[in-house]
Amino acid sequence: MQLGARRAPDGPSQSDRRDAPVSIDVRDLSKHYEVHRKSPGVLGSLRGLVSRTNDTVRAVDGVSFQIATGEIVGFLGPNGAGKTTTLKLLSGLLHPTAGHARVLGFDPWKRDHAFLRQLSLVMGQKNQLWWDIPAMETFLLNREIYEIPEPVFRETLTELVDLLDLGRILQVQVRRLSLGERMKCELAAALLHRPRVLFLDEPTIGLDVVMQKAIRQFVDHYRRRFGATIVLTSHYMDDVKELCERIIIIDRGRVIYDGALAEVSAVYAAYRVITVRFEREVGNAEVDGFGTVASFDGFTATLHIPRAEVSTQAARLLASLPVADVTIEEPAIDDVIRHVFSASERDRDAKSRETSPVGA
């Protein structure tokens, strides 16, 4: 499957977004790295001392999108697609090779104090809390760093402690907290200064389903409470389905989809799902020829049928088999996204084999 840039049809929520102020404006943003390619073995090392071969890695390659104030967008892609690099560029942690971006009207790479006070980047695999002291000490340090007025700090801290249920762990060494407790404290530390833009990079990674749900509810509450603009990367589709109406899919540094989550199936899935329940047991041969059989137990069949053939095949089923009930649905979002990622990885592996030197 060759992935090309696609865009879903505009829906009502997207129309509303066009009328809202833009918080994040990205135009042809790129970040390229030069990486040394070393041949294996001692001979390869010696050869590298004389003549180095460099490859250009296009971590981000001409990315463009806009995100409205108060919007939460899922930023998805397979491993190595460029998601985290993009977030680091928009946070000002990395300088781009080319392109432009404006976040809250600021150039991120100038790292103006006024810009940094309105931004937070939370990375599920990175800690900002000091390991050997209680989380409360980090909160107090952040108050000084962000110059948060005492009344505002106390008000915000009280609200965060209540929403995240942190009261009993504020004075406990961070090293003694569970993963879920640490993640909640990380969120609190990142939100004490009430940022208007929040980048969340895998915020629920490693958490159990109960804690994932709690984090999702809190993120949604924060967005509604403060009108924050949020960009979320996650490999847990439940995070995306519960929080995001819009998704951006990036692959090999390029945006391949930007549109409504509800429309991604129509763009990338060439089939629809027909589930048929029969009045009596039927045989395998009777359901063959209607489409790809995803599951079948004699009384119920789930079929994947090309979109253009759905009406015709549904009519044939009703006419030729003892059908008690039939439903026609879009494929599950999880399955569609998994298919997109798998196809991307296959394309990447094939390209790697084509460009790798023999014996490497």
Image (spheres, helix red, strand yellow):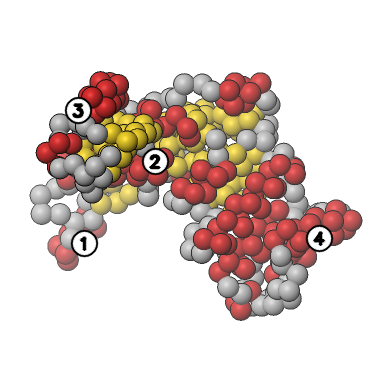
Residue at left offset 57%, top offset 62%: 211
CA gap, disc 2 and disc 1: 49 Å
Say which element carries label 3.
helix
Q: Is residue 180 above or below residue 21?
A: below
Mark nearer the N terminus (2 vs 1)? 1
Of the residues tagged 4 and 1, which is closer to the observer?
4
Q: Residues within 10 Å of mark 2 (few under 14, many from 20)?
A: few
Of the residues tagged 1 and 3, which is closer to the observer?
3
Closest to the observer: 289 or 187? 289
Q: Residues within 10 Å of mark 1 (few under 14, many from 20)?
A: few
Q: Residues within 10 Å of mark 3 (few under 14, many from 20)?
A: few
Residue at the spot of label 1? 45
Of the residues tagged 2 and 4, which is closer to the observer?
2
User: Which quadrant of the structure image shows residue 212?
Assistant: bottom right
CA gap, disc 4 and disc 3: 66 Å
Mark nearer the N terminus (2 vs 4)? 4
Of the residues tagged 2 and 1, which is closer to the observer?
2
Residue at the spot of label 4? 158
Marks 1 and 4: in contact by CB < 8 Å? Answer: no
User: Which quadrant of the structure image shows residue 243?
Assistant: top right
Residue at the spot of label 2? 332
Q: Amino acid at mark 2?
A: Ala
Closest to the observer: 63 or 67? 67
Of the residues tagged 2 and 3, which is closer to the observer?
3
Mark nearer the N terminus (2 vs 3)? 3
